[in-house]
Amino acid sequence: MIIPRNALLMILIVAISVVVAACAGDLEPPADGEVTVITTTYPLTFLSEKIGGDRITINQLAKPGVEAHDFEPAPSDIRAISNSDLFIYNHPAFESWALSAAASAASADGDNSPTVTVQTINLELAGENHGGHAEDHSTFDAHVWLNPLEAQEQADRILSAFIEVDPEGAQIYTRNADGLDVELQALDDLIGKQIARCELDSVVVSHLAFGHMAERYGFSQIGLAGLSPEFESGPAQIAGVIGKMNELGISHIMQEPNVSDRLAETVAAETGAKLLTLHPLEVRTSEQASNGIDYLEIMKS
């Protein structure tokens, strides 16, 4: 760990900025020439890997196959954060534990990792939730990576953090980020064309994770649950979803992996709707991870 001891950990969370928090003096490059990065979720891992390449090592805390909304860091995770050069997370609206984990890591041995929050813009995009629970938990939709253009903004902030921690790698990081921008722009174009061919402009989803995607591509989401899958709708709210599906002629329910499909199957049985997969990409499935299927491939599928 190369960040000087007994420094203040400064975390500033704003809608369109990233802060690298470190000591009062200048950051020094990692002594071993390799930046150790801790990420919370898969999209941040993907962006970091694409930008950092061989100059970084990454440990993603929420592992493949888990329900990311339910994740809580173990003591070993706190130690990993403490020993890292960068701790990258989205926003407390998603990782409610991130601030306390960073503070615990900072006090563990007196060292402080720079901490980056890469949340970008316009968090309040919850969409239509007939369950009425989105506001009970949070009005923030932190799933910004589902809009490739906002993923670009996240990547820009990660790039800045890498350069600050490891200025010797600036040229490599910048070149990699430029290539990633091209891929994300192409992805945005592809998704836009695919959605433009859809007959309906509303979709039923297992939980309200798709507000940023919906705003970008001009559709509405109707959630069986709120911004977290654990906040399920009750019988009256489910009846409202079914009524909306019948009214709009919606014949599919977009179910996500890594969470129970019980509620989606109940509604499908009532309406005759088919279940399809729409991945919010907080983490990959175990199968996707073992087969090396990445963010770009999942978003295209």
Image (spheres, helix red, strand yellow):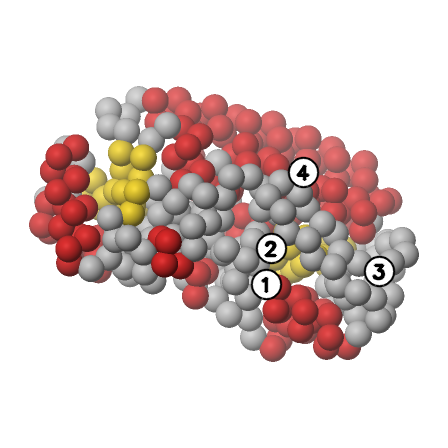
Q: Give the structural element (helix, strand or loop) at label 3.
A: loop
Q: Are marks 1 and 2 in contact (CB under 8 Å)?
A: yes
Q: Is residue 253 left or right of residue 149?
A: left
Mark in the foreground, 3 or 2: 3
Say if residue 291 shows up in the picture. no
**How far apart, in angstroms, are the residues tagged by discs 3 and 1?**
19 Å
Kind of residue sitting beneath label 1: Ala
Q: Are marks 3 and 2 in contact (CB under 8 Å)?
A: no
Kind of residue sitting beneath label 2: Tyr
What residue would you read off at disc 2? Answer: 89
Say if residue 71 shows up in the picture. yes
Kind of residue sitting beneath label 4: Asp
What residue would you read off at disc 3? Answer: 23
> Is tag 3's residue or tag 1's residue first in the polypeptide sequence?
3
> Is tag 2's residue or tag 4's residue first in the polypeptide sequence?
2
The image shows residue 271 at horizontal and vertical percentages of 10, 45
